[in-house]
Amino acid sequence: MQPPSRTASRRPAVERIACWSARHSVITVLAWVALASAAFFGGKLLGTVSQPQYDPGQSGTAERMLSQLHVVTPAAESVLITPRRTAAGETYGTDAQLRQAVSQVAAALRARPWAAVDVRSPAGPGGRSLVSRSGRSALVTFNVAGPHAKVDTTVAADQAAVASVQARYPGVIVAEAGAASTDRAANALLSHDFRQAGLTSGPITLILLLVVFGALIAAGIPVLLAGSAVMITVSLLAIPSRWLPIGQGTSEIVLIIGMAVGVDYTLFYLRREREERAAGATFGQAVRTAAATSGRAIVVSGLTVMVCMAGLFLTGIDEFTGFAFGTIAVVGVAVAGALTALPALLSLLGPWADRGRIPFLGKARTTARPSRLWTAVVSRVVRRPALWGGLAAAALLALAYPALGMKTQNPAIDLPPSLPVVRKLDQIQQAFPGGPAPAQVVVTGSGVASPAMRHALAALQARASSGGPIRPPVTGTTVADGRAVVVSVPLAGTGTNVVSDQALLALRDTILPATVGAVPHVSYAVTGTTANSYDFTAALRHSAPLVFTTVAVLAFLLLLVAFRSLAIPLMSILLNLLSVGAAYGLITLVFQDGHLAGLLGASTSGAITGWVPLFMFVFLFGLSMDYHVFILSRIRELRTGGMTTTDAVVGGIASSGGVVTSAAAIMVAVFSIFATLSTVDLKTIGVGLAFAVFIDATVVRGVCVPAALALLGDRSWYLPRVPSLPRSPAPLARARGEEPG
C-alpha cells in the first residue's frame, strides 16, 4: 500500500481508524484476539457477582429492609393432599387414607432436616387452617432448608420425598409446588429453550449468509465478529456486576442484540467493500470508501441504538439496569469490531474472502449489484408518492389499531400451563385461595417489641375473614433478634388478578394504617407475589411516557447532527413509531385476544406481560435505525455527489435495499426461533420483533421512506444555520482514488 497522504490528518476519525487497521492488519487482528482472550479468562477468573435486584415501589422498600437486617426469606413450599375421587360427605376428618397420606408427607419431610424446616401439617398447632373450607383437601407447608442460593438444588430432595408418598398412595393426589420448585422448573425449561435456540439460530444464520454472499469464508466473517463481540461483552460483565444488578437474563439479552447488530454492521461494511471492488476499485480504495460511508453509518447507527437502550435506565427497575448496561456495551464492542477487526481481517484475507463459493450463487453474489426489484418498486413509489405513501401509512395504522386496546399484566408465573408445577399451583390456589403467596408485611423500628405492636397485630388478625380482602390465618414471625417482625397476610383472589390487587390496596391504604401504622416508632412496607407484580406494573406505567419521550428526543438530536436536516429526524421517528405500533397491534391480537395463539402453542391471559411493550419499543426503535441510517446515508451520499433528491432516493435504496433485505431476513429468522420457546413473554417478543423487522425492511424502507423524501424534495435536507453543528464533508468524493492512509 502507498504511504499516507498529506491530507490524512483531515479525514474523519472513522476513516482514519479503519485505514490504519487495514494497513496494520496483523497487529489489529492479534489485538482483537488478545482482547477476546483477556476478557474470556478475566471473566472466568473474576466470575459474575450479581448484586441484589430489588423490585420497584413499596415491594423494593420491604426487600431492602430485610436485606439491611440480613434476613433472607426462606423459599416456601406447599404440598396439597386431596383424594382423586371423593365419596359423598367424605372429608379430612372421616377419610383415613387421606389422613395417613398427610401424616406420611409430614414425616418424610421432617426426616430430611437438611432439606426441609418448619414443617406444618393439619395435625399440628394451628392446623385447622391447613384444611380446605370444603374439608376435602389438606395442606402441608414447609420452608426449604440450607443456603438460599442453593434452594433450587435442595428442593429436589423434598420433591423426592413427596413423590415417594405419592407412589404409596395412588388413590390420593400429592402435589408439591412453591417458590423453589417453580424456580427449578423455570430454570430447567429456560436452559433447554435457549440451548435449542442457540443450536438452531447459528446454522440458520450461516445458511442465510451463504445465500447472501455466495461464499463460505465471507459468510463466516459476520458470525465470527458478532460472536466474538457477544463473548467479549458477556465476559466483561463480570466487572460491573460488582456494583450493578446484572442477572442471568442480561447475558441472554446481550446474545440476542449482539448477534443482531453484529451481523448487521458486518453485512453493511462487507457489502460496500464488495460493491467498490466490483466497480474496479483496488482493495485499498474499497476499504477507504467502505470506511467513509458504511463505517460512518455504522457509528451513527450504533450511537442511536445505545441512546435508545439507555432509556431503560429511566425505568428505575433494577432488572432493566442490567439489560441497558449489557446492550450498550455489546453494541459498542460490535461497532469497534466493525471499524478495526473487520477491515484488518479483510486486508489479511484479500481475495481469499471470496473463496469457497457456492455453486449457482457464488459468482452472482460477489458482484453486489443494485437490486432490480427495489429499483422497480421505488421508481413507482417516487412517481406517485402521495398514493403509495398514503396506502402504506394507512395499512400500518390499521395494523396498529388493536394496540389501542392493549392491557398489561405481570403474571406470577410466566410458564406454560401444561407444566406440572403450574398445574399443581393452580390446584393449591383453588383449594386454598391466598394460601401459597400471601402478602408479607415487614415491620421495623424500636416499637416492634412494644405492647402497642402486640395489640396492633391482634387487631390485624381480627380484620381477617373468609369473605374479606385479607384472609386468615394472619401470622407474625420475629426476625433479626427481635429487631423486626414479618407478618404473613393471605389475600383474596388468585394472587395476580384484580381481586388480589384490590385486596393489596385495601391492606396498604386502609387496614395497615389503622393497625400497625398507629404504633409509634415503627415503619412498615408490604411485599410478596401480588405486591411485586402490582408495583412492577405501576413502575412501568409511570416511567413509560418518560422513556418514550426521552428516547425519541435523543434520537432526534443525534440524527439532526448526523444528517443536518430537520425533516429526516422527524420522518425517522414517525416511521419508527408506525412500525412499532404495527408490532404492538399484532401481539395484542395474538397474545391478548387469542387469535392464532393456538397455532403458536401460546396460552392467553387477556393481557400482555407488563415489561414486553416497553422493552420492544426501546429495542425496535434502536434496531430499526440500523436500516434507516444505512439507507439514508447512501441517499445523502448520492445527493451530495450531484444527483437530484428523487434520483438519489431510487439509487440509494436500490443499491442498499438488497443488503438491508438480507440483514432483515436473518433477523426475522432468528427472532422467529424465539416464537417457538415455551414462555409466553419470549414468544411475544419473538413474534413482535420478527414482524416489526419484516415491516420495517419492506413497507417502511421500501415505500414510506421514498414516498416521504419524494414529497419533501429538497426540503428533506433543510436546516437553519447553526454554527455549532459541523458540516460533514462528502466522504465518497474524497475517498475514491486513494489508498488507505
Image (tube, rainbow, N blue to C red):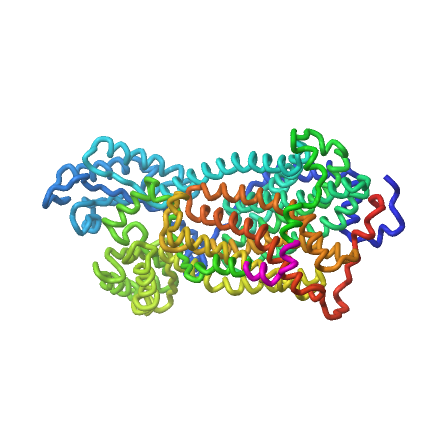
Depth check: 651 or 262 in front? 651
Q: What kind of secondary structure does the magenta stretch mostly adopt?
A: helix
The answer to whether any part of residue 302 appears in the image is yes
| Residue at horizontal 62 percent and vertical 64 percent from the top | 570
Q: Quadrant of residue 166?
A: top left
Indicate the quadrant containing the N terminus: top left, top right, bottom left or bottom right.
Answer: top right
Q: Magenta segment: does it hold 388? A: yes
Question: In the rendered structure, does residue 706 fall within the stretch colored magenta?
Answer: no
For the C terminus, which image quadrant? top right
Looking at the picture, does residue 165 appear above or below residue 696? above
Determine whether, in the image, residue 73 is placed left or right of residue 1: left
Query: Looking at the picture, how far across and down is residue 24, in whole percent?
Result: 80, 39
Pinpoint residue 253: horizontal percent, then vertical percent: 53, 46
Residue 474 at what x, y percent from top left?
26, 57
What segment is highlighted magenta in the picture? 379-391
Residue 652 in the image, given as x and y percentages of width and height: 70, 52
Q: Quadrant of residue 183?
A: top left
Is residue 143 visible in the rendered structure shown here? no
* Image position of 379 (left or right of 608): right
Q: How many marks?
A: 0
Nearest the eye: 158 or 666? 666
Residue nearest the viewer, comparing 453 with 426: 426
Among the 4 quarters of the image, the one containing residue 568 = bottom right
Left or right position of 403 against 370: left
> Looking at the image, which is closer to me, 405 or 315?
405
Say left or right for 301 vs 91.
right
Residue occupying the point 36% across, 55% down: 606
